[in-house]
Amino acid sequence: MISTIDIAPTVLSLLGLPALTDVDGLDLASTIPAADRRVFIESLYPVEGRGCAPVFGLRSTSEKFISAPIPEFYDLSTDASEKSNLFKQAPASIIPFEKEMNDLFAAHPEIKSPDAARRSMSQDELKQLATLGYTGGIETGNAESLPDAKERIVLFEKSETARELVKSGHIEEGLALAIESMTENPGDESSVHTVAHIYEGLGRSNDAIRVLEDFARKHPTANVLIHLAKVLASAGRWEEFEKALQAAELIEPGRGSIPFLRGERLMEAGRFREAVAEFEKAMKLDPNRMGANERAALQDARRLAGMGPG
């Protein structure tokens, strides 16, 4: 049984470079994994935008244990497609998996936090967020209190179908289905983005703003607030635009798109030197998210500010 955590130690070994310290991965060029090795698996996709509990698990060559509100256990030697959940029928086999998983969570409780970024916010930052109008969803909560993603698959499929309907020109039908998905699964951020995008495409920016604001008041996230800021900018509602960005910045201060959006606003206002400063801040904060378009915007700002290519 091997894992992605083995890649870096193995590659460094093959290249003759110094080994990493304090890592869990194995150097597969010189080590044969133990026959009973179990590797950690996870998916944060359900909690990061879908309003469901994250999924964690342990897998061996022949068995898989999944820790979720509805736990799962599979005998991969006879059920490679994982069609028969044996969690209730195989208590003895599950014990070592549950023990190892519980030990891991006890040593690293942050793994199970559905809201780790906001949990680290100071009380002063939380107060600032509340002052901006975003008071919901800032309690720590418990991932296990969230629904299991398996129970929401039909709703997720509705949202996907809505997007396909819009692409094929059935806009009103797609909008109705997207609203239905959003209403039935109120914690699903993805469906909120879908509804807002459809409204934008229809030129109904006020409706898009309303949907995004309603969600952000209950579940403030950087992604929703940044989307909200973009729609507010297109509507010329600059005071609200800045408030949305300030809230996003409190939640995720390292997000480069926040100063970048401010830079775009300053470019429109002809304040090119100030725009350069915001664009440069974005590049420094978040270089991995800032691509060719963002670099081109910085160069344009520098040229218009008479600052040279830089």
Image: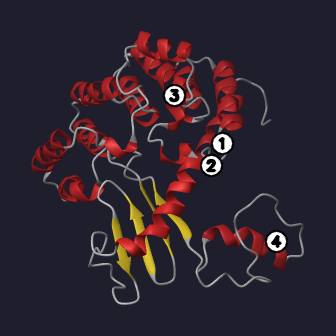
Which of the two discs, 1 and 4, sits closer to the camera?
Answer: 4
The residue singled out by tag 1 in the image is: 295
Q: Quadrant of residue 26?
A: bottom right
Amino acid on which the number 1 mark rests in the picture: Arg
**How far is mark 2 from mark 1, CA to CA?**
5 Å
The N terminus, quarter of image: bottom right
The residue singled out by tag 3 in the image is: 251
In this picture, is 230 found above or below 70?
above
Query: Judging from the image, what secondary structure is the residue with disc 2 in?
Result: helix
In this picture, is 57 found above or below 110?
below
Q: Residue at x 28, y 73 (%)?
A: 85
**How far is mark 3 from mark 4, CA to CA?**
36 Å
Please name whichever residue, 74 or 264, is drawn nearer the observer in this view of the structure. 74
Query: Judging from the image, what secondary structure is the residue with disc 4 in?
Result: helix
> Which residue in the rendered view is the most extreme toward the bottom?
78
Q: Are marks 2 and 1 in contact (CB under 8 Å)?
A: yes
Earlier along the polypeptide chain: callout 3 or callout 4?
4
Please name whichever residue, 211 or 307, is drawn nearer the observer in this view of the structure. 211
> Which residue in the rendered view is the most extreme toward the top?
131
Amino acid on which the number 2 mark rests in the picture: Ala
Amino acid on which the number 4 mark rests in the picture: Leu
Earlier along the polypeptide chain: callout 4 or callout 2?
4
The residue singled out by tag 2 in the image is: 292
Query: Judging from the image, what secondary structure is the residue with disc 1 in?
Result: helix
The residue singled out by tag 4 in the image is: 12
Sort mark 3 into few (<14), some (14-19) or many (20+) by Cα contacts within 10 Å: many
Q: Is residue 32 visible?
A: yes
